[in-house]
Amino acid sequence: MQNNKKHPSALLNSKRFLPLFVTQFLSAINDNVYKQSVLILLVFQAATLADGALYSNLAAGLFILPFFLFSGMAGQLAEKTEKSKLIRLVKLCEIPIMVIGAASILTQQVWLMLATIFFMGLQSTFFGPLKYSILPQHVAPNELTKANGLVESGTFVAILLGTIFGTYFITQTVGPVVISIAALVLATLGYFSSRFIPVSEANEPNLHFTYNIFSSTKNVFKALNAQTESVGKSVLGISWFWLIGAIILTALPNYVKHVMGGDELVVTSALVVFSLSIAIGSLLCEKLSRSRIELGIVPFGAILITLFLYLLSQEPAIGTYITPSENLLTLKQVLNTGDMIWHFIWMAGIGIASGFYTVPLYALIQQRTEESSRSRVIAANNVLNALFMVGSAILSIITLSVLKWHISSLLLLLAGLNLLISIYIYTKVPEFFLRFIIYILAICMYRVRTKGEVNIPSEGAAVIVANHVSFVDWMFILAASPRPIRFMVFAPIYYSPALHWLFKMAKAIPINSEKTNPAAFKKAFDDVASALERGELVGIFPEGKLTSDGSIDMFRRGIERIIERSSVPVIPVHLGGLWGSMFSRKAKWQLPRLKYSLVSVTAGEPIAADNVTADNLREQVLALKALHSKDID
């Protein structure tokens, strides 16, 4: 929504973000270069297929195990310690770990490889809370989505590059030497880049640190439970994404072979498509959200994931009839087979939708989590992510090995489960679905220009007052706000059968005429006072009715009554461009013109409670209207 005039690469080139991005990128590459190389070596060293599967699962389990055991300690340590210093220490530990890793690859000692995998997981456990909790300290609130999009896209590109590099070179004659050198160089470069990460003060330096695994884990989940429900359900949503992603990545080789009938190069191509599409989706998310945390994109991403999982499960399984390996299709043959290209398109669709789904959730956790517990909440998120990834393995084993399902049936099950999980989350936190409706209306149907939205406080109580032009004014103001706003709505409209569900979802406050229903009138002001006391934003339209001619009518004195009871700042807002729309009293029943910025939302500077009068607020809104007219001219 915000007009960001900076070049898109401005954040990536900044000293406050680039060192962290490079450090994270190199870490992800190094993890996957080594893990992929080790997995291939373990499989080829195994005497039987069963031994190979055992080694692969053991390696995966050893990497995840530290997340269960030490995430609580990692979250506490990140909370009470200066973060850049701690990141340097964690990255410094990567160098001796990779020395052991290089020795394990050169000697091909299985126990040494598995030990290195465990230590890599341990290092990632302590790095995770740091890399995400440090972002809000160095990027502006309107840059959080972009920063998370860059981190997410960089991570999946690094995973792709590391996997391909490790797979290719470990199969070469000099592969072990090349992999060993690469691991050591990447670890050294990662430590070097970490030295440029700016100082990030501890969020809670006086936090009591415990070495007890169970107590520390309990502590991070206690911090998570203390957050708003939107944060808790965002953590659940991210963990669910990792379950889906883990199943898809694990099942990809079997899907390519038994559904697409493709060979090893087709498997690699499918991995490239899936990984790059997540990176693309993560970057597109920032564009679609217009440099803000736009929760309306999350349901959009969830719907697309369900749709593309369903479509992917419906593709014809020609590979079922191909058993000899020499009959498997090459990449060229797959691309020349007309219908086969749809497999890649649906994979790309899942990846892009995943970027839409996860990036706003990460940004929301960082923005809405209390600063004093941000690292612990991210640590709790890591524990749940690991738990859901274990769940993905169990689900795959039960469906594919025990029940003997076809891979397409598993994908269909995932589509259904994703729909159910999404409905559960959006039922518990209606804000997600509400923002989705607002996003479709206020952003997709119209071109909206906002100005002065930084004047709407990111925390603390305040009252938003605006001119009343149309029936959907509140949606456009919500679209411009960084946080939810509870609007006062005329009771007959609030309780109307067609709209009651929507206003209830938005937690609107119904108000009736004092003459018609004194008790309801008083309750409305009591509800407003309670909301402001809890630090919420409340929105009102002091004109008390829609404009009948496009002008701004006199403001009623109810706003003065609110401020007399709750001494909070008031933010004047002017809405322009809605008069004459299909939602105003001068309705023109035509589709919005998408080529032009038809609607403007202009927020003025906060007015202290001592200076609040109905007449003064009206003058402020009129001044914003004049400013809007000047901008148009």
Image: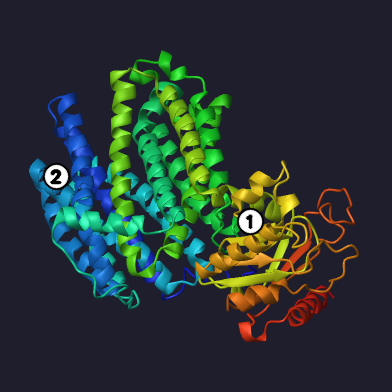
Classed neighbour count for the residue bearing mark 2: other residues with Cα under 10 Å, few (<14), some (14–19), many (≥20)? many
**Does residue 444 appear left or right of residue 146 in this picture?**
right
* Identity, as a three-letter code, of the amino acid under mark 2: Leu
Viewer-closest of 61 and 366: 366
Q: Earlier in the sequence, mark 1 or mark 2?
A: 2
Number of numbered discs overlaid on the protein picture: 2
**Does residue 288 appear left or right of residue 269 in this picture?**
right
Look at the image and tell me whether residue 446 can be seen: yes
Hey, which quadrant is residue 593 in on the image?
A: bottom right
Tell me where residue 21 appears, x and y as whole percent: 39, 65
Residue on which disc 2 sits? 114
Tell me where residue 385 appears, x and y as whole percent: 33, 47
Classed neighbour count for the residue bearing mark 1: other residues with Cα under 10 Å, few (<14), some (14–19), many (≥20)? many
Measured in 3D between alpha carbons, the distance from the residue under mark 1 to the one under mark 2, in whole angstroms, is 56 Å
Residue 167, relative to residue 406: is it above or below? below
The colour scheme is rainbow
Q: Label for residue 508? A: 1
* Identity, as a three-letter code, of the amino acid under mark 1: Ala
| Secondary structure category for the residue under label 2 | helix
